[in-house]
Every structure is written in structure tokens, then in C-alpha cells.
Image (cartoon, rainbow, N blue to C red):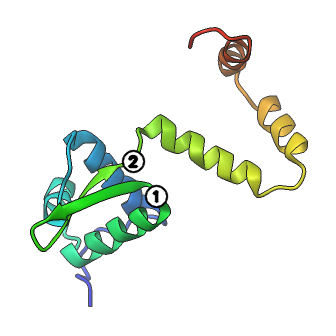
Amino acid sequence: MGDPNAERLPSGGLEASVLAALWAAGGPLTPGQVQEALGTSHARTTVTTILSRLYEKGTVTRTRSGRGYAYLPAEDASGLTARRMHSELERNEDRGAVLSRFVSQLSDEDERTLRSLLEGGDR
């Protein structure tokens, strides 16, 4: 059983924390190193499970490190967010409605950025 005093995070919160630790490291980390970077009381088995799930989703890559693995993010935070946005868009049959609703809720600044990107400009 897990540590009853372990910090409880919202659904997906631990995954986000693990990814943040990997991005901050700038190189591959083992589950033990991720656990240490988190600075929490999560069991190493919990961290390993989260890393395995992220690997199955394609969010991280892994290489052999001794008897286990060392993990690296498959892409930066912006790339991951873009992939999630594409995934959500693909789940809906009416892509036009989704895109229309998305664009209608953009801030003025985000709308200008999107318009510039669509016109071939830089960020």
C-alpha cells in the first residue's frame, strides 16, 4: 500500500510533475532520480508506473540503464500540448465546430499570434 502521508495530486498532476522533472533535468533520468527530483514521498514504484504509462502513450522515450530504464521526454512542453490538441480535435466528428469554438475563445493576443502563424509569419 502507498504512503498515507504522500502528497495527493489531482488526476494527471503526478504525470505533469514527472514530465516537469524530466524537462528540467535536460537528460535521461531513472525512476529513482525522478522520485528524488520530485522531492515528494511518492514510492519509486508509483513513479515507475507513471513513467511506464507515459512511455505507453508515447510521451517519453526510454533507454536501458542497468536493469531498468532511463526516461526522456519525447518532445518539449509546446510539442506535447500541440499533440494533445490534435488528439482532442481528432476525437470530434465536427472539426469545424471545434475549431470555430476554439478560435472564438482566444484572447486578442492569441488571435493575432494565430493569424500571423497562418499567414506564414514567425511567432
Rate crowding at label 1 as few (under 14), some (14 to 19) or many (20 or more) other CA atoms within 10 Å.
few
The residue indicated by pointer 1 is: 58
Residue 95 point in image, percent of width and height: 85, 45
Element class at badge 2: loop
Q: Is residue 56 left or right of residue 105?
A: left
| Residue drawn at 70 percent across, 23 percent down | 107
Most extreme residue toward the front is: 64
Q: Quadrant of residue 104?
A: top right
The residue under label 2 is which amino acid type? Ala
- Disc ID at residue 74: 2
| Residue drawn at 77 percent across, 37 percent down | 102
Residue 113 point in image, percent of width and height: 65, 16
| Residue drawn at 26 percent across, 91 percent down | 1
| Residue drawn at 29 percent across, 59 percent down | 62
The residue under label 1 is which amino acid type? Gly
Q: Quadrant of residue 116?
A: top right
Q: CA distance from mark 2 to mark 1?
A: 7 Å
First in sequence: mark 2 vs mark 1: 1
